[in-house]
Image: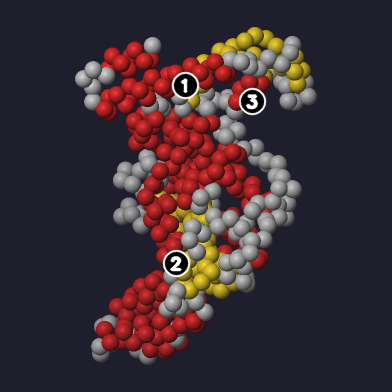
């Protein structure tokens, strides 16, 4: 039948038409083969079985169900049991196949999540239809991707809690362990639906917030410097974490990820940030042994702002700024402060000057750039800033997008797992086909998490 239908189209059709016809025919054939294989086991386990809660569920009848698969819809006939005590049905075959309470195979669900992680939901639905010949509605793509993202996030949070509680012991890195582990932290705004920003102050003219900040951490290692003494990031060593949660729970996730990456076995930890107080509080609380460095680009921005503030009183503003930039590169923050304090200002100008100088006074020990460079360290947080743009912004800050916190958390988490190269590590957990993991999932105590993986 499939051969005749393809043959009928072969007469004057172009190659693209023939390709699609063959693919459609082969997919239909595959769906029939899959249905035949699934029919070999209906899930009948005798007249009664354990319902899972310690009771007996009685066999009722065989019931039909259609599952959406990568080959298209496939019928499934399976035995249905009912527990009178729990007042709930039990379908062993659904449980075995991972389609309990859902009508989509794990393979297709992975495809949905992959496409929705990369492109907007409507485009993901079109890609599935065009590239795989599978029809999934836009709303279903959104619903499934957000559910899988939420489940993956719960799994990672459970893993983090187990690491911090000592129930899971990460293995030390293998031979040739990295010399430094960097934790670059930043935040970026994501556009939200009005219900998610109600009552929150913002920078818009009407004073209402339109965005919520997602915190992002990029962890990467460095083993060597180049011939000029500049640090070189280890290839494929960056892993990402994102969260809309407050700084404290986010800090717990970052701490657990650092442990997973072998922080206890690496010579030097470095925390890079833009100078935001919450970042240094996180670093001091979670990584008191780490070297803290303010991103040099942000420090230069603040220095330009300081120079603009004093320009009206400086004899030669460009020359003053050039000298201060040289002081900054040398890490001589005291020279910058002294030079700025040399001009007597009053009223609002004096207050603003105190604020601008305060940035340098507070972060002076984090701005010893000449010393950090001498040690072969990175002094810029470009990795996490690129992550804000490419991991978060490229997918979640497109024109017209407005997110819920739940949806943004889910998709940002999938984006991070994909960018970290950990997709295959979390995916078996997701594919229990439930919307979320239990509130307190059991955490293994004997299977360590491998920290020597670069990702």
Q: Secondary structure at mark 3?
A: helix
Residue 362 shows in the view: no
Gap in angstroms between the C-alphas marked 1 and 3: 21 Å
Q: Along the horizontal axis of the image, is 261 left or right of 346?
A: right
Please rate how many residues cluster around mark 1, counting C-alpha atoms within 10 Å: few if below 14, some from 14 to 19, many from 20: some
Look at mark 1 in the image and give the residue it sits on: 30
Residue with the most extreme left position: 12
Residue with the most extreme top position: 61
Please rate how many residues cluster around mark 3, counting C-alpha atoms within 10 Å: few if below 14, some from 14 to 19, many from 20: few
**Front in this rendered view, residue 61 or 237:** 237
Q: Are marks 3 and 2 in contact (CB under 8 Å)?
A: no
Instruction: Pick whichever of labels 3 and 2 is earlier in the sequence.
Output: 3
In the picture, the disc for residue 96 is 3
Q: In the image, what residue occupies the spot 36% across and 82% down? A: 325
How many numbered badges does the structure rendering display?
3
Please rate how many residues cluster around mark 2, counting C-alpha atoms within 10 Å: few if below 14, some from 14 to 19, many from 20: many
**Front in this rendered view, residue 265 or 442:** 265
Q: x%, y% of residue 51?
A: 73, 22
Gap in angstroms between the C-alphas marked 1 and 2: 50 Å
| Residue 19, placed above or below residue 286 | above
Q: x%, y% of residue 415?
A: 46, 47
**Quarter containing the C terminus:** bottom right
Mark 3 vs mark 2: in front: 3
Q: Are marks 1 and 2 in contact (CB under 8 Å)?
A: no
Look at mark 2 in the image and give the residue it sits on: 381
Q: In the image, what residue occupies the spot 34% across and 12% down? A: 4
Residue 64 shows in the view: yes
């Amino acid at each position: 039948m499939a051969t005749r239908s393809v043959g009928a189209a072969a007469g004057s059709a172009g190659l693209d038409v023939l390709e699609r016809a063959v693919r459609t025919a082969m997919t239909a054939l595959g769906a029939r083969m899959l249905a035949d294989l699934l029919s070999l086991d209906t899930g009948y386990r005798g007249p009664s079985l354990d319902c899972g809660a310690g009771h007996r569920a009685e066999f009722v009848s065989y019931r039909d169900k259609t599952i959406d698969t990568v080959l298209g819809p496939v019928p499934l006939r399976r035995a249905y049991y009912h527990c009178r005590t729990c007042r709930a049905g039990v379908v062993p075959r659904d449980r075995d196949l991972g389609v309990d309470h859902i009508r989509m195979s794990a393979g297709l669900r992975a495809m949905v999540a992959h496409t929705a992680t990369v492109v907007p939901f409507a485009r993901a639905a079109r890609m599935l239809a065009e590239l795989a010949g599978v029809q999934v509605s836009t709303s279903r793509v959104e619903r499934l991707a957000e559910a899988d993202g939420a489940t993956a996030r719960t799994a990672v949070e459970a893993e983090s809690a187990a690491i911090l509680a000592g129930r899971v012991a990460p293995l030390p890195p293998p031979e040739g362990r990295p010399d430094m582990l960097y934790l670059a932290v930043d935040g970026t705004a994501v556009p939200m639906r009005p219900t998610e920003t109600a009552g929150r102050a913002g920078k818009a003219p009407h004073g209402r917030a339109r965005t919520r900040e997602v915190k992002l951490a990029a962890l990467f290692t460095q083993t060597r410097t180049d011939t000029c003494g500049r640090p070189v990031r280890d290839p494929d060593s960056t892993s990402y974490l994102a969260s809309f949660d407050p700084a404290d729970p986010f800090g717990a996730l970052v701490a657990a990820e650092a442990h997973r990456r072998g922080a206890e076995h690496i010579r030097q930890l470095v925390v890079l940030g833009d100078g935001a107080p919450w970042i240094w509080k996180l670093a001091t609380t979670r990584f008191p042994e780490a070297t803290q460095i303010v991103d040099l680009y942000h420090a230069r921005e603040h220095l330009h702002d300081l120079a603009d503030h004093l320009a009206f009183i400086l004899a030669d503003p460009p020359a003053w700024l050039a000298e201060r930039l040289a002081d900054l590169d040398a890490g001589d923050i005291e020279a910058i402060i002294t030079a700025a304090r040399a001009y007597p200002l009053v009223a609002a100008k004096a207050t603003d000057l105190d604020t601008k100088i305060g940035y340098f006074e507070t972060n002076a020990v984090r701005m010893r750039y000449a010393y950090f460079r001498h040690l072969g360290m990175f002094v810029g947080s470009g990795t996490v800033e690129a992550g804000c743009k490419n991991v978060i912004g490229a997918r979640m800050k497109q024109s017209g997008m407005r997110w819920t916190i739940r949806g943004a958390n889910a998709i940002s988490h999938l984006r991070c797992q994909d960018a970290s190269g950990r997709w295959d590590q979390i995916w078996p957990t997701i594919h229990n086909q439930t919307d979320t993991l239990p509130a307190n999932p059991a955490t293994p105590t004997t299977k360590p998490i491998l920290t020597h993986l670069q990702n």
